[in-house]
Image (tube, rainbow, N blue to C red):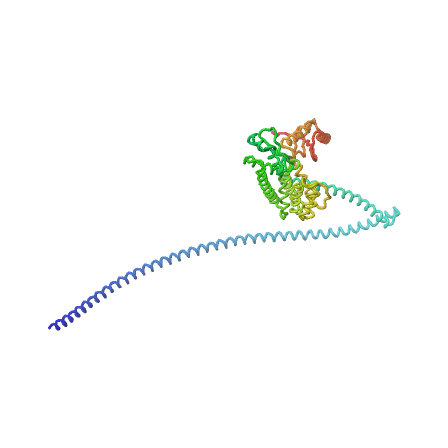
Amino acid sequence: MTLLYILASLILGVALGYAAFYFYSLYTTKSAAAEAERIVGEAAGEADKIKKEAELASKEELFKRREEFEKETQDVRNELKLLERRLTRREDSIDQKTETLAKRERVVDDLEAKAAVRQRELAAGESHLAGLIEQEKNSLSQVAGLSRDDAKRLLLEKLESEVRHESAALINRIVEETKEQADSKAREIVTLAIQRCAADTTQEASVSTIDIPSDEMKGRIIGREGRNIRAFERETGVDVIVDDTPGVVVISSFDSVRREMARRALEKLIVDGRIHPARIEEVVAEAKREIEEVIAESGKQAVLETDVHGLHPKEVQLIGRLRFRTSYGQNVLRHSIEVSLLSGIIASELGLDVQLAKRCGILHDIGKAVDHEVEGGHPMIGADLARRYNERAEVINAIGGHHDDITPTNIYTIIVASADAISASRPGARGESLEKYIKRLERLEEVAKSFTGVDSAYAIQAGREVRVIVNSDRIHDEEAAKVARDIAIEIEKELSYPGEIKVTLIRETRVVEYAR
């Protein structure tokens, strides 16, 4: 019974499961079909929408392409019309030129015909003249009793004499004009060089003054029984002057390098306060090293400023020593730099080697760096130094010959000598203060104004020229030359100056009327 019940239950369970599965499958199929229909409907709607949008976009693109095509077509039409108008104008121009050429051809043909007639007439006239000349020659030969060869010889001798005279006059005139042009060009080059280069000036000094905080410091500088000052003078090679002048100590030496070294050392000792022989030796050694560094840096800076390359290190050091050397109130280093730049400018104007000219200029006074240690003049000392450092022959000759100690053998010696004279003689370069320079110019104008008939006078070109304006009613043309000469003579008597002063006298008559 129980088994039957179990079998019946299993059969019933299977039947119920199958029925449930059947109804579930049926429900699922219907739902899927409905979902599929819904998706298909939405896809169809979306497809219609996309189709409409594509149709609209294609229509817009077609419309846009059509507008662009019409615009391009219109531009091409406009361009074709413009070209057509240009061609029409060109055709009209060609027609006009063709007509003009035709007229010119007719005119040329007429002129050629007239020229041919004229040429025939000239040929006939020349033939007639040749016959007349031949007759005249025969007549002259008969009258003078000379043969034709004799007459030709006399004529050639006369012509030769005249040509020689004219050629001599022409040569003299050309020589004078060449001299004037050469002088003018030389003045132009020198003036240009002066305008393009300038250097500072320094007054020469053989003493340095050092301020001290109190007179008690003087006793410490002197030391017990003068041992400190003796030690200082022995180490530096200068003279220390301690007198009654309050607040200062004076260092005296003609060697500017030693004087500068001593000045620095003494200033350090005064600030430090420890003054005794051992400390003096230490501070002087330190100041010496500083001076050597300053000399080396000054030499390098000068070489850099003048753009001169390839110098021996010893030459650079000697150039740097010139910083502490003065000559007639002019700093020799600044003077050497100025001469180098001036030499380069002059060489450039003459089409020469600028670098070589600058090299000669920067080294021309190198002998002054050691002239207090070596006997002889600084040009020859400098030439020996340059020879020792294997400088070119042109450089050696320029150094030794810039003061005419030796005969110049190249143009660079002349250039350096000229640049040296320019640098040394320009206003204010050597021992002349601005106040003295202005007074000299004022005195020059006063001398010119002191003459009768002079209205005004102006000193120009740094006192190298004075321009005098005279009253045209009181000074006539015949008197102008005499007045200018009298002013020049008076300037020679009253003033002392290097070189020469040009006196330019101006006489002008002005007539002014007004139309009303």
Q: Is residue 414 visible?
A: no
The C terminus, quarter of image: top right
Front in this rendered view, residue 411 or 336: 336
Which corner quadrant of the image does residue 28 belong to?
bottom left
Q: Is residue 82 above or below residue 516?
A: below
| Image position, residue 510 (x, y; %) | 66, 30
The N terminus, quarter of image: bottom left
Which corner quadrant of the image does residue 41 belong to?
bottom left
| Image position, residue 334 (x, y; %) | 62, 40
Residue farthest toward the right in the current orientation of the protein:
145
Front in this rendered view, residue 133 or 470: 470
Q: Is residue 3 above or below residue 246?
A: below
| Image position, residue 103 (x, y; %) | 64, 52
Front in this rendered view, residue 293 or 108: 293
Front in this rendered view, residue 498 or 370: 370
Q: Is residue 115 visible?
A: yes
Which corner quadrant of the image does residue 54 belong to?
bottom left
Name the residue rendered at 40%, 56% in the picture.
63
Q: Is residue 489 above or below residue 4?
A: above
